[in-house]
Amino acid sequence: MSKPSKRVHRTIAIAAIPILAAVVGIWSAHRPMGVLFAMAEPLLFATLMVALVYSLIAHRHRVAASLLVAAVVGTATLQMPNASLQNTSDGPQWLRALRGCALLSKPAEAPIRLVIWTIDEPENIGESIDQLLLLQPDIVVLNGIDDPILGSHLGSALDGEVKFFPSKSATGGVTAVVRGSFQYCGGKDDHWKVDLPSHKPGGGQTVITFPHIKDAGVFPLMLTRFDATTGPGDWLAWGDRVIGSARETAQTAATIGSHKMVLMGDLQIPSRSGPLAMALQPVGLRSVHSEPNWPAHMMNLPMLPQHARDQVWVGRGWHAQSARVVPEGKQSRLPIVFDLVPDNDETP
């Protein structure tokens, strides 16, 4: 083969890299593979940087430029919106009935502080809880534990009410504590559950409540927990469950009304991921971005966190003031503290 022909083939191959990235990104954006790409993003980025540096050292500038364009194109296409993710149904009647309580509740009148922490070793929380209480939170949500003794301690410290939401899965339940009380809505119930796609029953769910925070007011709160993966053999099925969970969570928020909504949860994947962002953003929720909190420790060894898997999303009635990771505990995730300020200039 002549040298000109080799150059033409090389040029075509280099130009094909961004095209291939775009095709893969569009195809996987709202499929389970896209969820896996989102989780592997730091590794993919590191691999790209190595290839980019190697290309520059070898004076292969066209290859380096192609890789850079491919990274931008691939990232953009992975986050493309997809209308098929949105469920246009109005939801069940019992869920629509909660919309009145969300609309009629008065706007919050003071800032609130939230703490969320996913715990995988309940016996190893030590004095971490007391350190978090020094931050004077208004709401504490602990995923992975529903211990009555701990709940009683938190309820006394916050001078409020505690709720336990047991789980049938091996990952434990949820403990929620508010500096105030959980309000009723038109009956005898003060919380409502929506099951999310799970490997086993109870592995994923959303709990809707209406907490009254002292000196702040009442607002709709969704405590959401997506199902976790059971291992490498479950990754693709888990990605499908994440996509379904994002859709169900978005539909629930839309049915109740998202204007005053606060969503706290273990959402498993980064907030910017297409299946998550493109489900929640169209219904009026936006992510309160924080630093990564996972993985903080693995096998008792400290790690460099890569993703914020515990998240808070809010409606237009809230302004995100701050979000920070607390370097506390020896769990696989670090607790995150969120400060929200009511934005009562917004209209529903």
Image: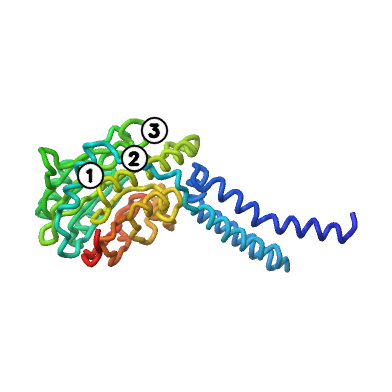
State how far apart marks 2 and 3 are (Cα): 25 Å
Point out the image quarter for the C terminus. bottom left
* Circle on res. 199: 3
State how far apart marks 1 and 2 are (Cα): 19 Å
Q: Are marks 1 and 2 in contact (CB under 8 Å)?
A: no
Task: Please state which amino acid type lies under the numbered disc 2.
Answer: Ser
Q: Position of residue 74 (x, y in %)?
A: 57, 55
SS under mark 3: loop
320 and 331: which is toward the camera? 320
State how far apart marks 1 and 3 are (Cα): 22 Å
Q: Which label lies toward us, 1 or 2?
A: 2
Residue at image coords 72%, 58%:
14
SS under mark 1: strand
Task: Please state which amino acid type lies under the numbered disc 3.
Answer: His
Q: Which label lies toward us, 2 or 3?
A: 2
Q: Where is residue 272 in the image (x, y as percent from the top left)?
A: 43, 56
Point out the image quarter for the N terminus. bottom right
Q: Position of residue 114 (x, y in %)?
A: 23, 57
Q: Do the residues labelled 2 and 3 touch (CB within 8 Å)?
A: no
43 and 286: which is toward the camera? 286
Q: Position of residue 145 (x, y in %)?
A: 25, 42
Instruction: Give left or right: position of 162 versus 331.
Output: left
Q: Earlier in the sequence, mark 1 or mark 2?
A: 2
Which residue is identified by label 2? 89
Q: Residues within 10 Å of mark 2 (few under 14, many from 20)?
A: few
Q: Residues within 10 Å of mark 3 (few under 14, many from 20)?
A: some
| Relative vertical location of residue 141 with respect to residue 167 in this rendering, above or below | below
Task: Please state which amino acid type lies under the numbered disc 1.
Answer: Ile
